[in-house]
Amino acid sequence: METINLEFKYTEAEAIRAVVEVTKSTSKSLSIMPWIGGFLIAMTLVSAFTHGKNFLTFGLLLFFGILFLSIPILTIWTAKRDFKKNPSANKTIRWQINEAWLRNETEGTEAKFIWENLIKVVERKSGFLLFPQQRLAHWIPKGAFRSDKEMDEFRNLVRKHGINFKG
């Protein structure tokens, strides 16, 4: 099998997409927090109109409701803030992937590791998350692959090496 060569520009949009996908993959509870927040806000409003005026209880419910509801906004805001400090921001990231190893590089940095160093690979709608640690992932957007065949070759390599694959 030939080496798979991938290339993409690490833009702010890619950084946000990667952070959102990592968050969804590692913290299932964070995905439901906005729903809980909306429920708390609705309950606060219903209770306020039906049970009187206990402002401390309503204030706490409203506070946590707004906090939980704003988690997606805070996640995106954090990703944007961190992107500005990232040395790979707006640079091209290149991946080389073959039977023996995976290698990525961008201007000024390079990493190479063997398949066995991956804990899991998660396929999302717009890309792949490669986890060398439980809460740390490398992002490869599907647009970096030149063809569906190349993407299938990558999936087959993941499976061949016995990596936990969620796709």
Image (cartoon, helix red, strand yellow):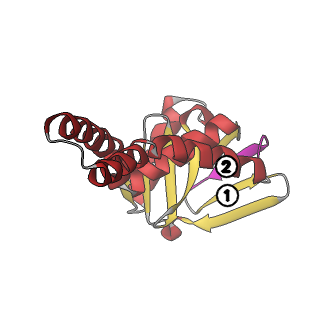
79 inside magenta stretch: no
Name the spot of residue 19 as percent of width and height, x first: 55, 48
Q: Could one spot residue 97 in this view of the protein?
A: yes
Image point 40% across, 43% down: which residue? 66
Q: Horizontally, is 26 left or right of 127 in the view?
A: left
Image point 69% across, 55% down: which residue? 104
C-beta proximity under 8 Å, tags 2 and 1: yes
Above or below: residue 160 compared with residue 71? below
Name the image quarter holding residue 108: bottom right
Q: According to the image, label 1 marks what residue?
A: 103
**Hey, which residue is sitting farthest left in the picture?**
50
Q: Return the mark for residue 95.
A: 2
Label 1 sits on a secondary structure element that is strand
Query: How many angstroms separate mark 2 from mark 1 (CA)?
Result: 6 Å
State the extent of the magenta-drawn residues as a range.
89-98
Helix, strand or loop: magenta stretch: strand
Label 2 sits on a secondary structure element that is strand
Q: Could one spot residue 88 in this view of the protein?
A: no
| Front residue (pair 107, 44) | 44
Name the spot of residue 59 as percent of width and height, x first: 35, 49
Name the spot of residue 7 as percent of width and height, x first: 70, 40
